[in-house]
Image (spheres, coloured by chain):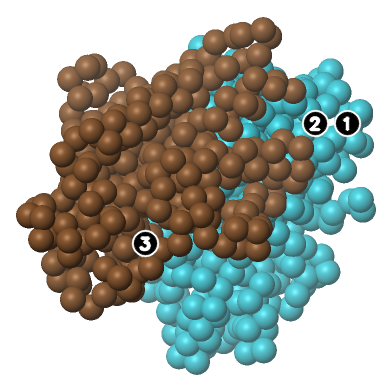
Chain colours: A brown, B cyan
Amino acid sequence: MSWLGNLLTALATGCIYSIMAVGVVLIYRTSRVLAFHVGEVGMLAAYAMVTIWTPKAGPLQTIEAILAGCAVALLAGIVMYILVERLGGRFGHFIGTVVTIAATIALNGLMSLIWGGQTYRLPLFPGAISVAGANLPLQNIAVIGISFMTLTSIGILMRYSALGIDMQAIACNLPLSRLHGIPVQTTLCAAWVFGSMLAALAGVLIASVSVVSIEGSFIGISAIVAALIGGMTSIGFAIVGAFLLAACETLVTMFGEPRFTPVIPVICLLILLIVRPTGLAGRSENISRV
Amino acid sequence: MNKTCGIIAAAILCASISGADAETIKLGYLTDTSGPTQDISNAREMSAAGSIAISGLPLSTVQAGVYAAMERNSVPVVAGYPSNIGLVLPPAKANAYATGIVFDLAGYIGGELARDAAPKGKTFVCTSFESPGGIVSCKGAIAAAKAKGFEKAESVMFPIPTRDFRAIAERIVSLKPDVVLLVLGRSRLIAMTPALAAAGYEGAAISMEAGTGDDAVREVAKAAPKIDMWSYTRFVSQGYGEGPQVTALANAAKAAGIKEWIQVHSGGWALGMLMEDVIKRCASPCTSEKFQQALNNTKLDMGGLTGAPIQFSKDDHYGPTTYMLVHYDRAKDAMVPLKGWRNYSSTLPKF
């Protein structure tokens, strides 16, 4: 049994969950809406990419495929912002969450309509290296590298950029942010687009280590659970939640019964509710204040 | 069953209906987009509208319910390729017939054929998702592998929604298998095999042909250059097999613009042939009872699509079957049959 291989698999899975969970937290913190559709946006972007990309693709075709994935994410983010914030905003956050659930159904239908439920491979990082007798797939190493860069960039963006600080201000106090002249609607739209972009990146990465398929959008549930474990209010703790979940899933697959992996998120959530109901971050949210 | 297969099967069925005495035959498609409840409802609706028989039902998950519902109405149901439940094996239920692969039997056969793929192998692993078909397949495969001399035979089952197989593949590789039986279907095979390769597996892998398609086996074989790829099948695919019906199917596929016809096409064609034959033998006015009588006296040569005729009797609604082990030849980029058709009885060995 390759300990290094398993560790790498768990880390790569945790990285992918983290990226999507951060998107969920970004949307929740700014709009107070639980984004159930992130998994579907991820797979939609992966489908868009695999339509253009082939294993023999040159740099130009690869760039085109990446742009196609980005375009899908951008469009999904803007459409969801319009639906949730501009049209559904006056009905409250609960309706916004319902809209995201409706979006999952619509996006699943769209993928089925366009790609007929087909499964495609997206081997962006083929090959493996051998370290100390262990076979280490390059895909896992690439996923960890890309995720590290992405999550670091998000951290820097949130802490030092004007947009990030505006997002934090809106997350803390929306009316006060408005009074201070923060462009609330633009910032909210940016948060939805960022959330979608992160979902798309996670979708493409999970597709690159598995396949592009409609069922792949199930990853969205893992990301939401990771965000919930983190308490929905902290990007850092969402990442911790993601790695915790990935580690539990990998351990159960390796040493227990792989059949039980779907109940791992549920067990994690149950334990959390008993031990620390406010999530790992420990900050209780008062939704009604916004 | 994909659309093309349905079209080909339906085309034959329509042609035969127009030339036969059958008066009320309604063509219905109970596909995997609808669940068992909807399929039972569809079947009841068809029965109430006067349909004398129901054929199709390529998904094993919906068959038990439809068989049971139609038994009450005495309407025969003929399930097609790819996957069928063991209910059709002797002793058969009154109205339940099938022409596809029965997982109980196909799993056992897979375990036996593993010896051909790894003549000196000691460890056998069967992997599948947690469906009734997957579970019974691996149970049978393990029994057969042990009977064929494998010292260690284990199964690795995983949840149905799984699409990321890296950890599962690591688990399989940790068992150090010489041969892995993949009871996965098309989409999971495409995901699992490269994951096995990435985890460092370099042994033999046999894919149970259950609507998977030779094209998918070839695709994953290219993505896993160190895995010795095999498949075993009840119906022929483009590239091997010969006979009048193989030629007829090839011509129809060409006319329909299909680049490569695979087992779902030949399975659909076979079901169409069977329906044509039974309808022609069903005395006018053809009723469910007469249709079933005709079914119970079936011995239809498949013209090269299978290795043996489709044969139904009053006590056996599946009949003797044949399977062919095919090997992926990297030099030719083709699936090459090994030893031709092998005969199997519809009666399962006890294990």
In the rendered structure, which disc, 1 or 2, sits on the residue that comes first in sequence? 2
Q: Chain of mark 3?
A: A
Instruction: Say which of A65 and B280 sits in front.
Output: A65
Q: Amino acid at mark 3?
A: Leu
Mark 1 secondary-structure assignment: strand
Q: Chain of mark 2?
A: B
Give the label, 1 or 3, closer to the camera.
Answer: 3
Cα gap from disc 1 to disc 2, whole angstroms:
6 Å
On screen, B89 above or below B329? Answer: below
Q: Amino acid at mark 1?
A: Lys
Give percent across and percent down for residue A67: 18, 33
Cα gap from disc 2 to disc 3, whole angstroms:
45 Å
Cα gap from disc 1 to disc 3, whole angstroms:
48 Å
Give percent across and percent down for residue B26: 43, 79
Residue in the picture at 59% in, 54% down: A265
Quadrant location of the N terminus of chain A? top right
Q: Which mark is residue B152?
A: 1
Q: Are marks 1 and 2 in contact (CB under 8 Å)?
A: yes
Q: Amino acid at mark 2?
A: Phe
**Local crowd at mark 1 within 10 Å, few (<14), some, or many (≥20)?**
some
Res. A191 visible in picture? no
- For residue B233, what is the image quadrant? top right
Count of marks, rendered view: 3
Q: Quick check: A215 left or right of A193?
A: right
Residue, disc 3: A34
Instruction: Say which of B148 and B122 sits in front.
Output: B122
Q: Which mark is residue B124?
A: 2
